[in-house]
Amino acid sequence: MQGCYVYTPVMGPPPPTTYVALDITDRGRVGLGDLIGPAATRVEGVVRSETDSAYALNVASVVYLNGQSNKWSGEPLLVRKDFIGNLRERKFSRGRTALAAGSAVGGVLLFALTRGLFGFGSSTDGKGGGPAEQ
């Protein structure tokens, strides 16, 4: 279901409970290195609160320079705004969800049709598949 969401730029301060992705700058990697690892590039989570200088998050995952990611279980983290390059909000995408659902249904139907699971194409002449009579 990852494909059912899109990340869009945040227009204004995100309200509490908004799921966001924070792209971490080089300065942020240094500043947050002891807390989340020195190679973090993105932090995803739910906004708890915001001040003039920082966001308080419940962290869901951290993505690193090598492409790996670690799932977190909502641990709190305070991220200074000057550590953030981009702030994006995760939003539900009806179009992507419809595409994913249509692909899944199509795949199941194709599988069923190619395996004869609907009974189409079977012989009803009563002859078995044994050896030919002589």
Image (cartoon, rainbow, N blue to C red):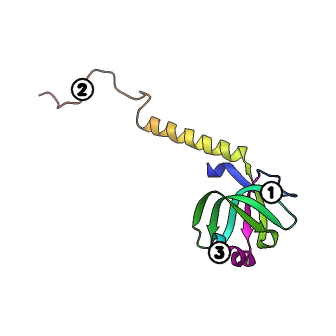
Q: Which mark is residue 34?
A: 3
Q: CA distance from mark 3 to mark 2?
A: 72 Å
Q: Residue at x 77, y 72 (%)?
A: 83
Q: Which mark is residue 128?
A: 2
Q: Which residues are magenta?
A: 18-34
Q: Where in the figure is residue 48, as x and y percent of width and height?
A: 77, 55
Q: CA distance from mark 2 to mark 1?
A: 72 Å
Q: Residue at x 61, y 59 (%)?
A: 72
Q: Residue at x 65, y 45 (%)?
A: 99
Q: Out of 108 and 121, give the one closest to the viewer.
A: 108
Q: Where in the figure is residue 5, as x and y percent of width and height?
A: 69, 51
Give the answer, above or below, for where 103 lies relative to 113: below
- Residue 114 shown left or right of residue 31 in the figure: left
Q: Out of 26 and 53, give the one closest to the viewer.
A: 53
Q: Where in the figure is residue 41, as x and y percent of width and height?
A: 67, 70
Residue lying furthest left in this view? 134
Is the residue under label 1 in contact with that under label 2 (CB below 8 Å)?
no
Residue 94 sits in which quadrant? top right
The answer to which of marks 3 and 1 sits earlier in the sequence is 3
Q: CA distance from mark 3 to mark 1?
A: 22 Å
- Is 100 inside the magenta-drawn segment? no
The three-letter amino acid code for the residue at tag 3 is Asp
Instruction: Name the residue that disc number 1 marks.
Output: 49
Quarter containing the C terminus: top left
The three-letter amino acid code for the residue at tag 1 is Ser
